[in-house]
Amino acid sequence: MNDITSNETRDVILDVTEKLIYKIGIAATGMDLLVKTAGVSRKSIYRYFTNKDDLVLAALQRRDERWMHWYRSEVGNAETPAGRLLNLFTVLKSWFESEGFRGCAFINTSGETGDPHDPVRLLAKEHKRKLLEYVRELCVEHGVQDPDTLASQLLILIDGAITVALVMGDHQAADNAQQIARTLLNLK
């Protein structure tokens, strides 16, 4: 670890934290496990983060940025506005079928917090707001009459498909949600 720069050390800590939180949750991700898995000292972790809460938030913020970038890029590969709206679900299905899929990190971590004002819950809410805004952009691009309402409905389909895929192990949830989206969009 001596020849790793401080930014690399911070990145390793964040990567390990994110992976552990996604795999086993916030409560089960203790500092001892983080130290052992990251191969860094406790002192190194506290050099970058005041406490576990700050570390968890930083890891989730990075996941938000990376996931949104990935999702927008993949969905944007469709050639038409209608295609991009339907691609919201095609991309989800590929994610559901990927190794290590464990649902939405933001839904999962929100479920670990009881307080609606908890910073983790607020970050999850912000993530969903960004996703809603992106879906709304796609609705506007497609020229729907009421983009706010349709975007809200599609967000429910997105999060519902994610939850069903995780809980039921049903990767077809994305296809089912896409069929409902086709109906809402009046597409065959």
Image (cartoon, grey):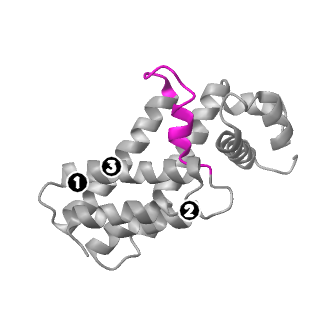
Q: Is residue 28 above or below residue 152?
A: above
In which quadrant of the rendered view does residue 31 lie?
top right
In primary-sequence order, the first of circles 1 and 2 is: 2
In percent of width and height, residue 146 lies at 14, 54
Q: Within 10 Å of the Cα at label 3, are there few (<14), some (14-19), or many (20+) other Cα atoms?
A: many
Mark 2 lies on a secondary structure that is helix
What residue appears at the point 75 percent right and 32 percent down from the top-left corner?
45
Q: Is residue 74 above or below residue 24?
A: below
Dot 1 amino acid type: Leu
Q: Badges 1 and 2: C-beta atoms under 8 Å apart?
A: no
In which quadrant of the rendered view does residue 79 lie?
bottom left
Magenta stretch: residue 140 in it?
no
* Residue nearer the viewer, 145 or 36: 145
In percent of width and height, residue 76 lies at 38, 70
In primary-sequence order, the first of circles 3 and 1 is: 3
In percent of width and height, residue 107 lies at 50, 39
Dot 3 amino acid type: Leu
Question: Where does label 3 land, which residue?
Answer: 132
Name the residue furthest bottom.
79
Magenta stretch: residue 114 in it?
yes
What residue appears at the point 81 percent right and 50 percent down from the top-left corner?
4
Question: Where does label 2 land, which residue?
Answer: 95
* Magenta stretch in the rendered image: 102-119
Q: Nearer the viewer, mark 3 or mark 2?
A: 2
What residue appears at the point 28 percent right and 67 percent down from the top-left corner?
182
Q: Within 10 Å of the Cα at label 1, are there few (<14), some (14-19), or many (20+) other Cα atoms?
A: many
Dot 2 amino acid type: Trp
Q: Main secondary structure of the magenta part?
A: loop
What residue appears at the point 74 percent right and 47 percent down from the top-left corner?
12
Q: Evaluate whether residue 123 shows in this view.
A: yes
Horizontally, residue 26 falls left or right of residue 44, namely left
